[in-house]
Image (spheres, rainbow, N blue to C red):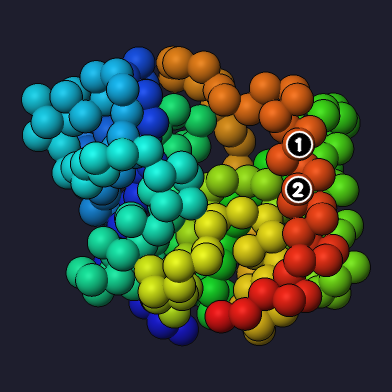
Amino acid sequence: MALLEKVLVIIPAFNEEASIGKVVDELERDYPQFDYIVVNDGSTDRTAQICRERGYQLLDLPVNLGLAGCFQAGMKYAYQRGYDCAVQLDGDGQHRPEYIEPMRRKMEEGYDIVIGSRFVEAHKDVSMRMIGSRILSAAIRLTTGVKVADPTSGMRMFNRDMIGEFALKLNYGPEPDTVSYLLKQGARVAEVPVVIAPRAGGESYLKPLVAVDYMLRMLLSILLIQNFRKR
């Protein structure tokens, strides 16, 4: 069993002035064993200013790259500094840091990717998000033979090999279709149950129409486009 001692928490942040302080302060106060980096994705509000004023570890991107580019910047940081694993913790406060340690322990069992899953255990409520996730889950299982209960979860942990994949490959984004692709390449994926908190502040960009468009694009990518994807 490999011991993963160097853990980096990557915090993508775009216009999260209402929540970034709470997210990082809690991480510094209650989980000092984990290193972190806030990746400010060209925010137009006070996100970067708050981070500088409070002395947070900050990677300040001059322009907005979107989640894929923002996350890849964090993975390059992790790769260059030799971290054993890296986990995404969104700057809106919805991802809870108490789940990082269970995810790390699961990864030590030999997995390449560990997903913080909202749906790995049975739930009675059936939300639109859950329905969309189940559709993508079915598509991933159809194309890879592997069941991933919550492929849309943004709380994902990656081992050193996966950090290298994201850091060095320009066409990778942390999305369900990429998880599907990596499964086809032999990556081992596990899930641990998590509870997602309400946003600590600000407003989600994932409006209903945007969410539907996202699900359709992911479904098309998983079922078709990933068959032609190259490293």
Three-letter amino acid code of the residue under disc 2 = Arg
What is the x, y in percent for residue 227? 77, 75
Circle 1 residues within 10 Å: few <14, some 14–19, many ≥20: few
Circle 2 residues within 10 Å: few <14, some 14–19, many ≥20: few
User: Is residue 169 visible to us here?
Assistant: yes
Q: Secondary structure at mark 1?
A: helix
- Front-lying residue, 21 or 221: 221
Please tell me whether residue 142 is drawn above or below residue 207 in the rendered image: below
What is the x, y in percent for residue 54? 12, 27
User: Would residue 101 be found to the left or right of residue 60 on screen?
Assistant: right
The residue that disc 2 covers is: 217
Q: Which mark is residue 151?
A: none
- Report the residue at 85% width, 71% height from top: 143
Quadrant of the frame with the C terminus: bottom right
- Report the residue at 52% width, 64% height from top: 172
The residue that disc 1 covers is: 213
- Front-lying residue, 149 or 106: 149
- Report the residue at 42% width, 52% height from top: 69
What is the x, y in percent for residue 218? 74, 51
Please tell me whether residue 67 is drawn above or below residue 224 in the rendered image: above
Three-letter amino acid code of the residue under disc 1 = Asp
Choose top left, top right, bottom left or bottom right for residue 21. top left
User: Would residue 179 be found to the left or right of residue 105 on screen?
Assistant: right
